[in-house]
Image (cartoon, rainbow, N blue to C red):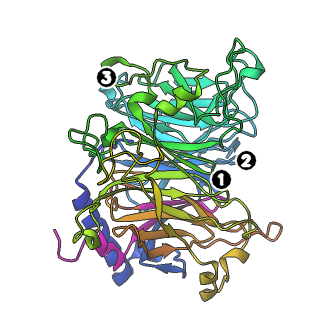
């Protein structure tokens, strides 16, 4: 998601790191007011809000035109009183809005509840009206897109809200799409309006139950360039086998016997700062092999994972002003060949590992590679597999650094060999594993991470291309392992350089209800947002020396 820059990254990061150093050395009044965890390395908590005790999922942020930084946090299902409203009415969980302009003094501004009991709105993406092709450049409009996940098909889908005034958003969604099954972690391209939405049409939108997609949580793609109008449906996508076996006329369209796993979410590189740049092993000239023409999709969540690299141009049908692509097949009943056509690369994971988050990092130049004559530069994906059981009652789950420098061997020779490789999808491979030993928790009073209650293991990584850590560090939520930061400049040998494990005590009646760091994001200033799945709120964290020196070396201006 493209952010509206307030001031330069370097200046903000320098200011932020200086402020954090002063807080540690001088113990300012604001620092004393923040309760610090005793389980941390090179990280410091600078701010906290409790999010009304709501179990939180994805934090996100946007720089408002007036210079404020506003965070939006999606939540899981449930209810809680809302003290921001007169009488503190009990509301269904929804989306929390927080002013984080001063990270040491974050302020909860508003809560947008889900309209139906039992619903969830885990995800939030925002765009400025001035960025969207069909938006309103005047009046400094800001829009929120969120999912609504509920068993009621009349409400399940996606909504757009006018949040120009974050303390008083629109009373109702300004646009919506309903009857979408299995909604979850969306991606919204602000400069095109194209949105990639986990889910699929339900039986009210497709003729006959037999024509439902076999993978209910596939990818619905819409054109939402005009945020105050219903989106234009473009197509549904998934790996071969996700679609129905037959079309509306009974014709066989898929020969794939088993359906692929669910889509957790997609990340489009269309708004990457170097979107026009060539992929590392692209031919010369690169043609469509550029950073901005790739979408990275993670399937499987916690098992049977698939990482897909998608050619955006082949994925999308034609749209006005060059926003779309070349797909001309059936939007609802594609053949296996139709689905395979957009697949530029693929990695099938081990049965015990899934695809939760697929964050691409382009153009790494590891210092240890520079004496070699080939593959001195790399493109990678930080691929996370979600832990899904409390107290390690499952296989261990990790994050992986996947080398995607060679996407495939079906288009042009990817390496020094003159011919294509025998496997058309030969290329993507795991370079290294990011792991945390649960026994490391025994160094601290709360003990082994597996016995603290709740889940231990990886969940997700940050997803902001413009954060100042990009290309050097990755930040990952590790449930009872807290927030973990790895140095990825040598992708084959990443180093854990910082962590912060929040406080939080399980209630007596729920031994598995202790703290559980759920999701993370890094804003353009370098502040880290970490949410808690069990209702312990939002922590705003800051990287400290020596880890911060990786991003901003001492004496560098």
In primary-sequence order, the first of circles 3 and 1 is 1
- Rounded to the nearest angstrom, the CA distance separating label 2 from label 3 is 42 Å
In primary-sequence order, the first of circles 2 and 1 is 1
Instruction: Decide which of 389, 139 is in the foreground and name it.
Output: 389
Dot 1: element:
loop
Q: Residue at x 37, y 42 (%)?
A: 269
Q: Would you call the spot at circle 2 few (<14 residues within 10 Å), some (14-19), or many (20 or more)? A: some
Q: Quadrant of residue 541?
A: bottom left
Per the image, the residue denoted by label 2 is: 78
113 left or right of 225 in image: right
Q: In the image, which residues are magenta?
A: 528-557
Does residue 205 show up magenta in the picture? no
Quarter of the rendering occupied by the C terminus: bottom left
Instruction: Decide which of 195, 169 is in the foreground and name it.
Output: 195
| Position of residue 185 measured from the top left corner of the image (x, y, whole percent) | 56, 42
Q: Quadrant of residue 137?
A: top left
| Position of residue 266 measured from the top left corner of the image (x, y, whole percent) | 50, 42
Instruction: Decide which of 443, 304 is in the foreground and name it.
Output: 304
Per the image, the residue denoted by label 3 is: 322
Quarter of the rendering occupied by the N terminus: top left
Q: Residue furthest top?
A: 249
| Position of residue 69 measured from the top left corner of the image (x, y, whole percent) | 38, 49
In primary-sequence order, the first of circles 2 and 3 is 2
Per the image, the residue denoted by label 1 is: 54
Q: Is residue 238 above or below residue 88?
A: above
Please say if the residues under marks 2 and 1 sit with CB atoms less than 8 Å apart. Answer: yes
- Rounded to the nearest angstrom, the CA distance separating label 3 from label 1 is 42 Å
Does residue 531 show up magenta in the picture? yes
Dot 2: element:
loop
Q: Residue at x 76, y 34 (%)?
A: 151
């Amino acid at each position: 998601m493209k952010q509206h820059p307030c001031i330069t990254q370097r200046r903000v990061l320098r200011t932020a790191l200086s402020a954090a150093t002063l807080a540690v050395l001088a113990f300012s009044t604001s620092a004393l007011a923040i309760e610090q965890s005793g389980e941390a390395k090179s990280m410091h908590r600078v701010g906290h809000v409790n999010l009304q005790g709501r179990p939180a999922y994805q934090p996100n942020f946007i720089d408002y035109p007036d210079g404020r930084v506003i965070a939006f946090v999606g939540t899981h299902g449930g209810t809680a009183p809302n003290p921001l409203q007169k009488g503190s009415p009990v509301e269904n969980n929804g989306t929390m809005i927080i002013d984080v302009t001063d990270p040491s003094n974050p302020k909860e501004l508003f809560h947008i509840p889900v309209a139906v009991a039992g619903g969830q709105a885990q995800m939030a993406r925002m765009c400025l009206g001035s960025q969207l092709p069909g938006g309103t450049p005047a009046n400094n409009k800001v829009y929120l897109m969120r999912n609504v996940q509920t068993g009621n098909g009349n409400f399940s889908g996606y909504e757009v809200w006018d949040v120009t005034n974050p303390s008083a958003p629109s009373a109702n969604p300004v646009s919506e799409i309903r009857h979408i099954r299995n909604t979850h972690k969306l991606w919204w391209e602000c400069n095109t309006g194209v949105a990639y939405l986990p889910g699929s049409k339900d039986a009210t939108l497709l003729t006959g139950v037999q024509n439902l997609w076999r993978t209910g949580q596939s990818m619905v793609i819409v054109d939402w360039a005009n945020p105050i109008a219903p989106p234009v449906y473009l197509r549904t996508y998934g790996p071969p086998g996700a679609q129905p076996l037959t079309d509306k006329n009974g014709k066989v369209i898929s020969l794939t016997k088993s359906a692929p796993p669910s889509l957790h979410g997609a990340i489009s590189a269309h708004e990457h700062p170097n979107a026009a740049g060539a992929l590392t092993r692209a031919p010369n000239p690169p043609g469509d092999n550029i950073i901005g023409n790739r979408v990275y999709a993670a399937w499987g969540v916690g098992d049977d994972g698939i990482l897909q690299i998608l050619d955006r141009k082949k994925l999308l049908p034609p749209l006005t002003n060059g926003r779309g692509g070349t797909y001309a097949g059936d939007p609802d009943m594609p053949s296996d060949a139709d689905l395979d056509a957009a697949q530029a690369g693929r990695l099938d994971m081990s049965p015990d590992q899934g695809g939760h988050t697929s964050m691409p990092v382009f153009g790494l130049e590891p210092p240890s590679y520079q004496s070699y004559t080939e593959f001195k530069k790399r493109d990678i994906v930080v691929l996370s597999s979600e832990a899904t059981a409390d107290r390690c009652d499952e296989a261990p789950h990790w994050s992986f650094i996947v080398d995607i420098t060679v996407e495939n061997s079906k288009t042009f020779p990817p390496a020094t060999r003159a011919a294509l490789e025998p496997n058309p999808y030969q290329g993507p491979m795991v370079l290294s594993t990011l792991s945390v030993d649960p026994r490391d928790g025994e160094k601290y009073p709360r003990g082994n991470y597996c016995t603290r209650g709740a889940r231990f293991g990886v969940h997700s990584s940050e997803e902001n291309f413009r954060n100042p850590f990009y290309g050097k560090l990755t930040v990952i939520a590790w449930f009872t392992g807290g927030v973990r930061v790895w140095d990825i400049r040598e992708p084959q040998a990443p180093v854990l350089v910082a962590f912060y494990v929040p406080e939080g005590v399980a209630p007596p009646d729920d031994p598995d209800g202790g703290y559980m760091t759920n999701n993370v994001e890094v804003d353009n200033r370098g502040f880290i947002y970490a949410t808690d799945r069990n209702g312990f709120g939002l922590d705003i964290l800051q990287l400290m020396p020596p880890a911060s020196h990786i991003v901003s070396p001492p004496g560098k201006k």
